[in-house]
Amino acid sequence: MRHISMFLLLFPLLGCSPGHDHTQLPSNTSVNAPADKAHHPASNKTPIGHLSQQQPKTVQTKQRKKVVLDVPLIRQNPELKYGCEVTSLAMVLNYAGINIDKMTLAKEIKKDLDPKIRSQSGDIISWGNPADGFVGDMTGKTSGYAVFDEPITELMEKYLPERAVNLTGRSFDELLKYVENKHPVVVWTTGDYRLPDRWESWKHGNQTIKTPLDLHVVVLVGFDDQSVYINDPLWGKKAHKVNKQQFIRSWIALQKRAVSYH
């Protein structure tokens, strides 16, 4: 386990931690996505003498698709320093017509109450499992971390019976289909929507929990050819534009976690 006692002094936030707000990839960054095929119209082999007999052709141009949902922005601060997950859920539920606030969801979300235990050198050696419930103190009065997709799906199901859908592990195209069908998606990413660079691990019973400390959760509200649009509860940004491939890479690193409804 990497020693982080001095590291934690430098980065007091764990889950929902802020990072550098970069939304564009550098020009020399490679993207592992298929490039659009260039359109090469077939050559016209009709003899010149017969051109006058040809009917004019309609040239079809590819229409760029852009979808942006008007999802209400809710900020997690100042009440919920580590509450990006329930605040994002509150945005989605309010968009779906459910009048609910983030503080109610913060009380109702499952909690993993296992205490954080440190070694003499300050390393975290034991703590909770975010898959079981929120780990730590969401308000930030004491250390807090995060919660994963299963408890969020379960809480959404309470307000949208038989409609909550755990999209974890699905393709990103499927997430975009939900948005296109007017269903915003709760998505796990990082504080700057890039690959995580702050990892930690600890024991939880017989399990080893390995997870990025710069984890963050936002609401996917839109997309176009090159970008996605998100509501960010930490930065307070509505329909914030982020490079699509950059965002996808961070989502993959967070185990493709996502939750929506139908």
Image (cartoon, helix red, strand yellow):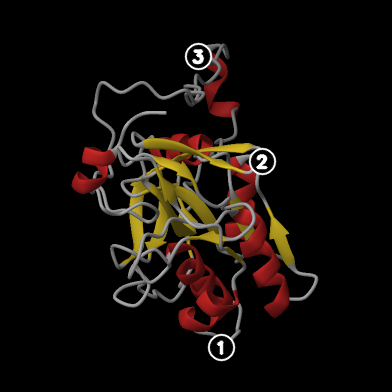
Quadrant for residue 3, please give it: top left
**Dot 3: element:** helix
Q: Callout 1: 10 Å neighbours few (<14), some, many (20+)?
A: few
Position of residue 174 relative to residue 67, above or below, is above
Q: How far apart are the alpha carbons under marks 1 and 2?
A: 29 Å
Considering only order in the chain, which callout, 2 or 1, is on the residue closer to the N terminus? 1
Q: Quadrant of residue 156?
A: bottom right
User: Can residue 180 be seen?
Assistant: yes
- Which three-letter amino acid code belongs to the residue tagged 2? Gly
Give the amino acid type for the residue marked by disc 1 in the picture: Asn
How far across and down, in percent of the image, does residue 240 sit?
33, 58
Q: Which residue is at 50% across, 22% downward?
A: 37
Kindly state the secondary structure of the residue where label 2 is placed. Answer: loop
Give residue 99's mark. 1
Residue position for label 3:
48
Q: Which residue is mark 2?
A: 169
User: Disc 3 marks which amino acid?
Assistant: Ile
x and y percent of residue 174 in the render?
65, 46
